[in-house]
Amino acid sequence: MNPEQTHALGYGRVDDDPNVSVLLGTMDETGRWEATLQLRRWEQEQLRLRPGQRLLDVGCGLGDAAVALAGDLGDTGLAVGVDLSVAMVVGARSRSRVRHRSARFAVGDAHRLAAPDRCFDVVRSERTLQWVASPETAVAEMVRVLRPGGLLSLIDTDWSTFAIDVGDSSFAQRVHDAMQVERRRPSTIGSRLVDLIRDAGLLVVGQTTATQRWTSWNPDESPTPEGCFSMSSLAEDLVDVGELDKCDVDQFVSTIHTAARAGRFSMALTIFGAVAVI
């Protein structure tokens, strides 16, 4: 299986992927997105972490956000990261050691957090809810482990905002229509974060958005735009919802690649953030 094919599997089953290194590398790429960096800066300002506090990062991935925030917790504080993927946790532990930060990482399920009630001052989760079976259950677990007055920070993508421009409006509309449909996962959860938080009984104290933009891409140098899925995977999504015939997949992909080579390619995707107090 080549990198373009394996990337279609997503982050719901990282350790079962035949080429885990591709997903880990893509996780690094998404961590470098300007939208991701912008939201993390906003989150840090909203949380105003203090030395001695305890923070939990649910779906921590390779641990970069947790390790960075650990610096605000001082020597007496602690950042804990949990992720369903063993490979992610191993990577997070390695990065934490390199940066000498007080952070711990363990394999864990967002639906059943292995932590007692009311033991964290802050709980965060970034681009994780779109991959879990029940975002409501995951948020309820995060709320359960928060102390009174604690803060919950959620950052997640809404794939219904995804847009692609290759110089053909009908082409762009088909992609837009296909991305409105959730298939096998809550891919549009980003724009529902505030409602999800309020339904859990918390008070929203801050919300924002950031849009990631790709203004160029050379398919001859990289199989996918930075941190994104392959165009073959996008074509399969269109087939799934009836926006594209299977026999037209190759032409669909070729149209995007040709436009990209000619400098007529752009994409955009919006990520949402919300912070709430319990």
Image: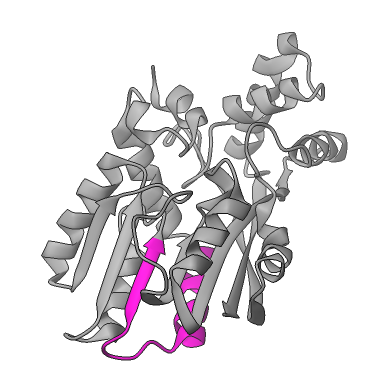
Q: Where is residue 165? Give x, y as percent.
A: 73, 45
Q: Residue at x 18, y 64 (%)?
A: 96
Residue found at x 42% / y 36%:
221
Camera sees residue 246:
yes
Residue 145 in the image: state x and y as whole percent. 43, 68
Of 199 and 248, the residue lying toward us: 199
Q: Is 248 rendered above or below residue 190?
A: above
Task: Tell me residue 204's x, y (percent).
Answer: 66, 79
- The C terminus, quarter of image: bottom right
Q: Residue furthest front?
A: 117
Q: Is residue 65 above or below residue 162?
A: below
The colour scheme used here is one colour
Quarter of image, res 260:
top right
Q: Would residue 10 be counted in the magenta stretch?
A: no
The part of the chain drawn in magenta is 34-57
Front-lying residue, 176 or 201: 201
Front residue of 261 and 147: 147
Q: Identify the residue at image location x=34%, y=61%.
A: 115
- Position in image of residue 229 (x %, y %): 53, 37
Image quadrant assignment for residue 258? top right
Q: Is 53 one of the magenta-colored residues? A: yes
In the image, taking residue 24 as reference, residue 179 lies left or right, namely right
